[in-house]
């Protein structure tokens, strides 16, 4: 249950794990808390937060997102950040504390709203709410976005800080709820999420692709709206959740106007969230030999052998990490760009690579920056025997080849040239947009997005 919070004050509320593989949405539940605030005369302070956590966690539902918001009695400038139940949601730059009794009533009512919106009783749904009068240490976020965190560790942290919390099920939702409050919120993007009316959830979505693309052309800060290679629209999910569409942006200000340009079925409500999406916060600069299961890394690598194509269009490439340890990396076909880039490399090439691992030690590539490329020579392969059609074997450098069947010999010049993939220049390469993770680096310039828009 946690300890009783210290006195009155503004109140941070973090929530997580209200959805299930069958449906639901924790971002929608957060909009219900914003609605509750309007009903109870409690104001939103700052922006609601949508915080993506470690993308490698095997028990995540879908995007592994947690939510948080801060509440109090607003004062000073305010900004419209959404509409819920036909009423404007205002965000205040500053705010005064809630009296202790009012704060107690609000957090209890918030937990009731979380339970009402959660898919309780379904497998994989373990809702949690954390309420506290101050932001938790940033270390709690960094661990949750980069490591596997134990519930017991988080409970001890919450107890030490006097947090009030409620859970159902495995209590795993406490990890995300606490991490969303702990997020420093400095390397940021924004997302406006529009939601469907209740009676349309479960039906086919109606979002006009041409209008989304036109909005993206009009507002250059929008990103990952569609995939030009696959022609896939990326703003609308394909699950039975209440989200209609989401517009991601490196700037907050254009989002409400961009939403007006999207033609779609009726929008029930919408909210702009401050997010850590496209930040690359899950990546740690370390050698692959030091990377634990279910975590990610970024390191300088040297190609140790020729890449090989596998079933389904995946390409595997042997590397050395900075400590000289061998690494097997794989570029999956759905990333489109990465297999072609990896297939063009030769032994001795150097690159900065980043990606993740599961239980096995294979690096699943999320991106690559080619740093140094060796001069390229044509690659040869043994000829086929003209008599029996079998592939010959090399007898050693300059000694030619011999058929393992009929034993016929062939001179060195009988070798055939292997098909040579096109060479890619030095530079940075990312997966095609439809194959990128929420946290994946958007592009090199994403590092420049540092909360440039203050309240």
Image (tube, rainbow, N blue to C red):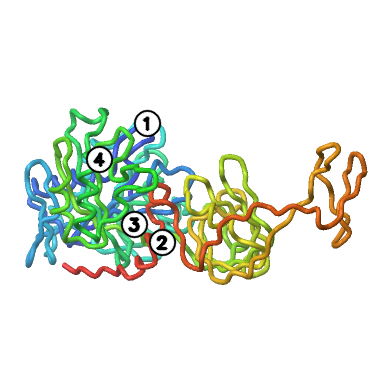
Mark seen at residue 232: none
Q: Earlier in the sequence, mark 3 or mark 4?
A: 4
Q: CA distance from mark 2 to mark 3?
A: 8 Å
Where is the C terminus found, in terms of image quarters? bottom left
View extreme (right): residue: 407
SS state under label 4: strand
Asked if disc 1 and disc 3 are in contact, CB closer than 8 Å, the reply is no
Q: CA distance from mark 2 to mark 1?
A: 32 Å
Q: Is residue 46 left or right of residue 304?
A: left
Asked if disc 4 and disc 2 are in contact, CB closer than 8 Å, the reply is no
What residue does disc 4 label? 243
Q: CA distance from mark 3 to mark 4?
A: 17 Å
Residue 46 sits in quarter: bottom left
Which residue does the image show at 17% across and 52% down from the upper left? 258
SS state under label 3: loop
User: Which is closer to the viewer, label 4 or label 1?
Assistant: 4
What residue does disc 1 label? 122
Q: CA distance from mark 4 to mark 2?
A: 24 Å
Q: CA distance from mark 4 to mark 1?
A: 20 Å
Observer able to see residue 281 = yes
Q: CA distance from mark 1 to mark 3?
A: 28 Å
Mark seen at residue 277: 3
Asked if disc 2 and disc 3 are in contact, CB closer than 8 Å, the reply is no
Q: Find residue 130 and report its horizontal and vertical position in percent.
A: 29, 52
Q: Callout 2 environment at 10 Å: few (<14), some (14 to 19), or many (20+)?
A: many
SS state under label 1: loop
What residue does disc 2 label? 280
**Front-most of residues 42 and 249:** 249
**Front-most of residues 284 and 9:** 284
Q: Find residue 94 and report its horizontal and vertical position in percent.
A: 13, 66
């Amino acid at each position: 249950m946690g300890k009783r919070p210290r006195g009155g004050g503004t109140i941070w509320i973090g929530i997580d794990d209200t959805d299930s593989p069958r449906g639901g949405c924790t971002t929608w539940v957060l909009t219900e808390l914003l609605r509750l605030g309007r009903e109870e005369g409690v104001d939103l302070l700052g922006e609601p937060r949508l915080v993506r956590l470690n993308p490698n966690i095997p028990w995540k539902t879908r995007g592994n997102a947690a939510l948080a918001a801060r509440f109090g009695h607003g004062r000073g400038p305010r900004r419209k950040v959404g509409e819920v139940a036909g009423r404007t949601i205002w965000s205040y730059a500053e705010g005064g504390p809630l009296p202790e009794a009012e704060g107690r009533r609000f957090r209890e009512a918030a937990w009731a709203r979380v339970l009402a919106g959660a898919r309780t009783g379904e497998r994989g749904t373990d809702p949690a709410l954390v309420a506290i009068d101050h932001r938790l240490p940033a270390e709690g976020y960094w661990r949750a976005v980069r490591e596997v965190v134990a519930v017991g560790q988080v409970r001890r942290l919450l107890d030490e800080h006097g947090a009030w919390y409620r859970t159902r099920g495995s209590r795993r939702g406490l990890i995300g709820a606490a991490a969303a409050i702990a997020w420093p919120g400095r390397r940021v993007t924004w997302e406006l999420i529009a939601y469907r009316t209740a009676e349309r959830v479960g039906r086919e979505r109606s979002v006009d692709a041409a209008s989304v693309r036109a909005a993206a052309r009009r507002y250059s800060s929008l990103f990952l709206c569609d995939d030009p290679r696959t022609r896939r629209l990326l703003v609308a999910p394909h699950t039975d959740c209440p989200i209609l569409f989401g517009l991601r942006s490196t700037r907050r200000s254009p989002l409400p106007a961009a939403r007006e340009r999207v033609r779609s079925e009726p929008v029930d409500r919408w909210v702009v969230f401050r997010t850590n999406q496209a930040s690359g916060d899950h990546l740690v600069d370390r050698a692959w030999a030091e990377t634990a299961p279910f975590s990610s890394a970024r390191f300088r690598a040297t190609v140790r052998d020729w890449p090989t194509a596998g079933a389904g269009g995946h390409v595997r490439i042997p590397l050395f990490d900075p400590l000289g340890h061998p690494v097997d990396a794989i570029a999956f076909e759905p990333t489109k760009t990465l297999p072609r880039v990896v297939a063009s490399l030769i032994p001795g090439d150097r690159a900065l690579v980043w990606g993740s691992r599961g239980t096995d030690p294979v690096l699943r590539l999320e991106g690559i920056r080619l740093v140094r490329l060796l001069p390229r020579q044509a690659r040869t392969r043994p000829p086929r025997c003209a008599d029996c059609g079998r592939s010959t074997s090399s007898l050693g450098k300059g000694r030619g080849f011999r058929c393992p069947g009929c034993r016929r010999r062939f001179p060195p010049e009988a070798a055939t040239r292997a098909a040579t993939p096109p060479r890619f220049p030095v530079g940075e390469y990312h997966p095609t947009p439809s194959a990128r993770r929420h946290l994946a680096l958007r592009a090199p310039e994403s590092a420049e997005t540092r909360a440039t828009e203050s309240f």
